[in-house]
Amino acid sequence: MSAPVKSGSRNVLYAVAVVVAVVAGIFVAVIPPDDKLGGMVRLVMTHGALTWVNMVTFTLAGVLGVAFVAGKASARRWGEAFRWISLPLWAINTALGLLSMKLIWGGILWDEPRLWMTFGLLAAAMIVVALQLVFDRPRLTALLDAALAGCLWALVLLLPNLFHPDSPVFSSGNWAFIGPFLGIVVSLLMVAIIIATLIAREALPNQE
């Protein structure tokens, strides 16, 4: 009975993920055109929302990595699940950022410090995943997850934005933008957590 139950639970999670992803798409669709950016504001806000979600997944990978090193064995598979989620999400987010720069500014803003932060974090995340695949040293990669999360927050807090203001959605004070933005963040975060749950359930079945 355990296999069918497990399969049924997995199918339910897949279905919920699809529904929530559709909800995220609806939130994107209801964003009104901006006076300056027009409909392109939807791309920019999706990029911003995905950045928030990615910061959460990197942070969870780091916190769970510390928990695993500290002796919580079950934290290993959850930390690794969020590691596997964080890398492709950051790759997608990097592509969205470059696309929005190209379409809105007419080119890549190579002088933007946070662009180089994006590339650096992408490279670092790829290295951590590669180390896991090649050497399978879980405590080392768990510590690297924690270091990566710490670097992410340090860079976000310290690096300036040269070409656009901080928190443009919230500084607008317009809930026609703020509401959908928060909806996108929550929806995409739910999808990420569901996928991480599916990964964690399949990984390291003997470690509880």
Image: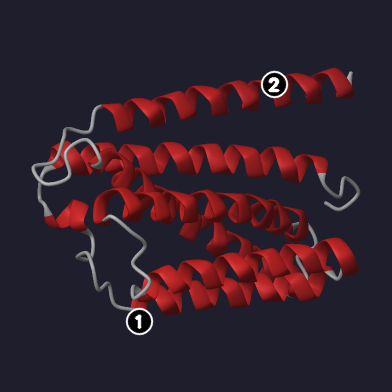
Q: Position of residue 2 (x, y in %)?
A: 87, 24
Give amino acid for label 2. Asn
Residue at the spot of label 1: 158
* Mark 2 → mark 1, Cα distance in angstroms: 43 Å
Q: Position of residue 55 (x, y in %)?
A: 47, 60
Left or right of residue 56: residue 30 = left
Judging depth in this view, the residue of 192 and 96 nearest the camera is: 96
Q: Residues within 10 Å of mark 1 (few under 14, many from 20)?
A: few
Q: Quadrant of the N terminus?
A: top right
Q: Residue at x 30, y 43 (%)?
A: 182
- Return the disc, 2 or 1, that comes first in the chain's sequence: 2
Give amino acid for label 1. Leu
Residue at the spot of label 2: 11
Q: Quadrant of residue 60?
A: bottom right
* Residue 109, above or below 16: below
Q: Position of residue 48 (x, y in %)?
A: 35, 52
Q: Quadrant of residue 51?
A: bottom left
